[in-house]
Amino acid sequence: MRTAGERTSLLRKIPAVNTLLDRPEVQALTSRYSREFVTDLVREAVDELRSAVAAGEAREGDVDGFAEGLMRRLESAISHRFSRRKTLVLNASGVIVHTNLGRSIFSKEAAARMLAAAVGYGDLEYNIEKGGRGSRQEHIESLLARLFPGRRGLAVNNNAGAVMLALNTLAEGKEVLISRGELVEIGGSFRIPDVMSKSGAILHEVGTTNRTRLADFEKALSDRTGLLLKVHTSNYRIIGFTEETPVQSLASLARKAGVPLLVDQGSGCLIDLSSYGLKDEPTVGALLDAGGDVVTFSGDKLLGGPQAGILVGTGDLIARMKSNALYRALRPDKTTVAALEATLESFVAGDPINEIPTLRMLSRPADVIRKRSEAMAAGLDLLAAGRVESRIEEGVSRVGGGSAPMEDIPTFLLALRPREGGAEAYELSLRRGRPPVVSRVRDGWALLDLRTILEEQEEVLLGSLIAALP
């Protein structure tokens, strides 16, 4: 244990912060980062050494070599500070709309529009023809009117916001009738009852968890009723002894009662996807045709665009929501507007199945995925020098994002087993790589589904698969 005098002597030998900042290599660092940032890092390093000396934990060599080893410490500190930045991930999980990985990938046009909106001025709320104030929603409203003739539309920042805006506008202080089986949690512990409470509407549950009939709604109607709410259970299914009230029946009852019917469709499915395996996902248009006065849905799930909440319905109801002061707190920013416009344009005048990555991934036949997997396996055989065993096996992909929970999409999986180290260690190495690769492990094999890998990412993925091998 060092004496107090020895510790004092060592403390005096520690270079001053300003002296360290004058070193040429540290000066070079300030050309890449602000001087204030570098100064903070140097001061933290000096304080850490002082604490170690004061506690008797530092050797004389630690103090003598501190200045020479400073750059290594600073580079390590910078790497640690920025290691948690959001980064590109290669999604080989087979979950297409992966909530934890950012949900839908934008189309190239949507990404380009978003970038253009971010780095320059635009006509967000400026009418170029009139030379005065315009509406940020004008083009979105026009596109939604084309997609859903006879209805108006409005976009907000997410679907929970859309539901809240509708409830607050149409049923604040009034009862909202909803089946007990549809009181869903929509992710991140956000639940329909909580959203309803914040909106100022009053929850009135009807029926039971597994069976709710039209008679349950009829019995609950009163002069306090402001709205009927139907929630599509897009993130789970109740099977067995069940019964739910269809939208058509609720619409008839709502008209008789003189109250609106709000349908939360959720997933943003605009086109019939049954031929691709999604047989239980109703389209927004079908729900409107069935009698929904307002339908809400997400922009970043099966719509394949940015995070947004969209409301489509009768003109007077949408107009009331747009004039609600709450709308201003929920309206989307300029980059979201730009990306959403491009995404909706694909549905109006383009080829959404091929232009929008989410729908392209979902629609690709399993045989196409098999051929891509076989090509990847051949590349590994050629370049990995026998360090990994590979095979192709049948599997299933999932839509994800709270959509179509019971639907399996047939696929083929690239199964890999390193000659050394095991599949679990290989999966960890892939996940910690740059870029990280998200895969899964089953029965001693690392499994990768190329359905959720873009074609242009295949070369990077091959390099990552090789780099992660022991």
Image (spheres, rainbow, N blue to C red):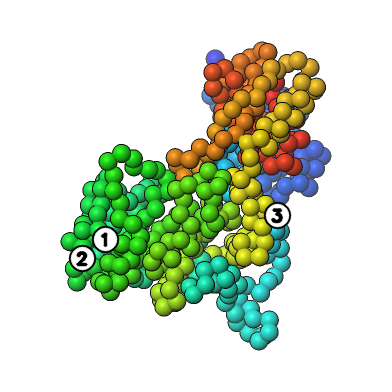
| 91 or 116: nearer the viewer | 91
Q: Nearer the viewer, mark 2 or mark 3?
A: 2
**Callout 1: helix, strand or loop?**
strand
Q: Is residue 291 left or right of residue 427?
A: left
Q: Looking at the figure, which quarter contains the C terminus? A: top right
The residue labelled by disc 3 is 108
**Callout 3: helix, strand or loop?**
helix
- Which residue sits at x=66%, y=74%? 123
Q: Indicate the position of residue 166 as horizontal and vertical percent values.
A: 39, 67
Q: Are marks 2 and 1 in contact (CB under 8 Å)?
A: yes
| 415 or 19: nearer the viewer | 415
* Mark 1 surroundings: few (<14), some (14-19) or many (≥20) residues within 10 A: many
Q: Quadrant of residue 144?
A: bottom right
- Which residue sits at x=28%, y=74%? 258
Q: Is residue 2 left or right of residue 16?
A: left
Q: Quadrant of residue 224?
A: bottom left
The residue labelled by disc 2 is 221
The residue labelled by disc 1 is 177
Q: Indicate the position of residue 14 as horizontal and vertical percent values.
A: 67, 31
Residue 438 seen anywhere in this rendered image of the structure: no
Amino acid at the residue labelled 2? Leu
